[in-house]
Image (cartoon, rainbow, N blue to C red):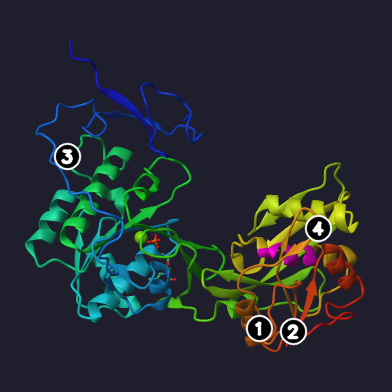
């Protein structure tokens, strides 16, 4: 007797189980498990239709060539992709609804089309009229982009096959796609996965670059693009601060380029505009005189970036004081506080501590430790830090301040933006690298605290590395 081939798939992470449950054991999401017919993918071991072919195995060393790319001319986008879209690759652009994915990709499509490439933009979410309206608003209506509104993968592929192979195909969004090859309802993980697979295969076989747009939703109702991440060559996330106008494009996976680059855009009335000097943006309207703010000379990918780290340390009415962070890692804050307490004798035990990275940027670098520590001490002591000073350095559990990569680039960026002083790890800067900045090298957190208490970052043992 044939067995019923129903299976239960978590719409959030794609885990398959044999029975329904209220909560996915794999990702912990509630109400995300949906019954799906077994549409072939993941079906039991089928009998092989043909005998395997012997493939050529080659040595690691051999002739290689740089993957051919097509640059869009939007430099912030090209920076994140690693120099342009690689031909024959598939990309996923993820992000919250309304963040600007469609806008960015329409601009990229128009830019490539204007450079003479054949570009097809398939919208599964908006009617052609809506996309046209948007193009008009963006001033791109004249760009020779071939526009279609369709959600059937078979129809999309047939359309693409009917014309010359495009350089770029944008499909907005992957959640709306459905394919006849599987039986599940549109929007389910099985459908999204099968549809994405078909489009990725199209990219590989024809050499077109396929860009898939994916929404990230909190409530696992629609299949998240997470299941697609494994299939594509690059995953870019478009993020931003709801209240502000700027957006950050970040590569989280890239088989053909770096993954730590960011592209910074500003959403304006005429679409996304590149921000050429993000430091100016993130330092924008800085209050130079209040305690608790330290400027961190950071690095995003290959690009130095200055951001303000704000701390608020206030007496706590609670038995267990609060520690809250926005824009950096909670564990790093806990560590910096612990090291300040244990190695520098600064006590936070009865104080609430809040850390905020200005401008909505997320700082993941350990080099931010020293700036966090400086902001904390400044707020606790009620002493403003010098307004023309930047901080960077990694703090170890022993209280030592350790050198970080690319000190010269950090100092150069700070100098360019009008800063005159830096507090940095001792010994991390070669003579001649300080770019005219007065650099105070610190070996331990205790030295940093003493410097702030003495009323200025560079009072005392000023050492100019030049
Ligand atoms: P959109 O690209 O539709 O977002 P997504 O595809 O990620 O869902 O962008 C939607 C938001 O962007 C919308 O709130 C309006 C805003 N916007 C502008 O501010 N200026 C513009 O020129 C455009 C086209 C959109
Ligand atoms: Mg959209």
Which quadrant is the C terminus positioned in? bottom right
- What span is colored magenta in the figure? 367-375
At x 84% / y 82%, what residue is drawn? 462
At x 33% / y 67%, what residue is drawn? 105
Looking at the image, is mark 4 or mark 1 earlier in the sequence? 4
Label 3, on which residue?
Answer: 181
- Ligand 2, by image quadrant, is bottom left
Label 2, on which residue?
Answer: 465
Looking at the image, is mark 2 or mark 4 earlier in the sequence? 4
Query: Alpha-carbon distance for marks 2 and 3?
Result: 66 Å
Return the residue nearer the eye: 360 or 408. 408
Label 1, on which residue?
Answer: 433
Choose top left, top right, bottom left or bottom right for residue 112. Answer: bottom left
Query: Alpha-carbon distance for marks 2 and 4?
Result: 23 Å
Query: Alpha-carbon distance for marks 4 and 1?
Result: 25 Å
Choose top left, top right, bottom left or bottom right for residue 183. Answer: top left
Query: Where's residue 249, x and y in %?
Result: 46, 66
Question: Tag 3's secondary structure?
Answer: loop
């Amino acid at each position: 007797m044939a067995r019923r081939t129903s299976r239960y798939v978590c719409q959030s992470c794609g885990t398959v189980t044999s029975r329904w449950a209220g909560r996915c054991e794999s990702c912990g999401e509630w109400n995300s498990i949906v019954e799906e017919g077994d549409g072939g993918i993941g079906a039991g071991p089928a009998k092989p239709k043909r005998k395997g072919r012997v493939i050529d195995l080659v040595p690691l060393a051999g002739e290689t060539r740089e993957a051919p790319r097509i640059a869009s001319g939007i430099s912030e986008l090209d920076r994140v992709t690693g120099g342009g879209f690689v031909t024959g690759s598939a990309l996923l652009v993820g992000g919250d609804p309304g963040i600007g994915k469609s806008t960015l990709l329409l601009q990229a499509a128009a830019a490539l089309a204007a450079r003479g490439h054949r570009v097809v933009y398939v919208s599964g979410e908006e009617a052609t009229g809506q996309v046209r309206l948007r193009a008009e608003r963006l001033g791109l209506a004249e760009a020779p982009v071939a526009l279609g509104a369709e959600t059937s993968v078979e129809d999309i592929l047939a359309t693409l096959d009917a014309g010359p192979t495009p350089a770029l195909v944008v499909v907005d969004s992957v959640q709306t796609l459905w394919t006849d090859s599987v039986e599940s309802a549109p929007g389910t993980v099985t459908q999204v996965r099968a549809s994405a697979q078909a489009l990725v295969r199209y990219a590989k076989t024809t050499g077109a670059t396929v860009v898939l747009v994916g929404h990230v939703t909190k409530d696992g109702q629609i299949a998240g693009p997470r299941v697609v991440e494994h299939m594509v060559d690059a995953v870019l996330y478009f993020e931003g601060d709801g209240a502000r106008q700027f957006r950050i494009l970040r590569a989280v996976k890239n088989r053909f380029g770096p993954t730590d680059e960011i592209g910074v855009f500003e959403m304006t009335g005429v679409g996304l505009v590149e921000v050429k000097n993000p430091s100016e943006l993130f330092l924008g309207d800085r209050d130079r005189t209040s305690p608790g703010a330290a400027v961190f000379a950071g690095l995003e990918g290959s690009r130095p970036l200055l951001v303000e780290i704000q701390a608020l340390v206030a007496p706590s009415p609670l038995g267990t004081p609060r520690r809250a962070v926005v824009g950096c890692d909670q564990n790093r804050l806990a560590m910096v506080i612990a090291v300040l307490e244990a190695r520098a004798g600064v006590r936070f035990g009865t104080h609430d501590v809040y850390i905020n990275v200005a401008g909505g940027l997320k700082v993941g670098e350990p080099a931010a430790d020293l700036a966090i520590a400086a902001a904390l001490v400044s707020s606790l002591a009620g002493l403003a830090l010098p307004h023309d000073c930047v901080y960077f350095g990694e703090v170890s559990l022993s209280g030592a301040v350790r050198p970080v990569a690319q000190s010269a680039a950090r100092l150069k960026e700070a100098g360019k933006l009008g800063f005159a002083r830096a507090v940095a790890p001792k010994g991390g800067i070669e003579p001649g690298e300080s770019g005219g900045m007065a650099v105070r090298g610190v070996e331990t957190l205790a030295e940093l605290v003493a410097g702030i208490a003495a009323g200025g970052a560079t009072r005392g043992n000023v050492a100019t590395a030049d």
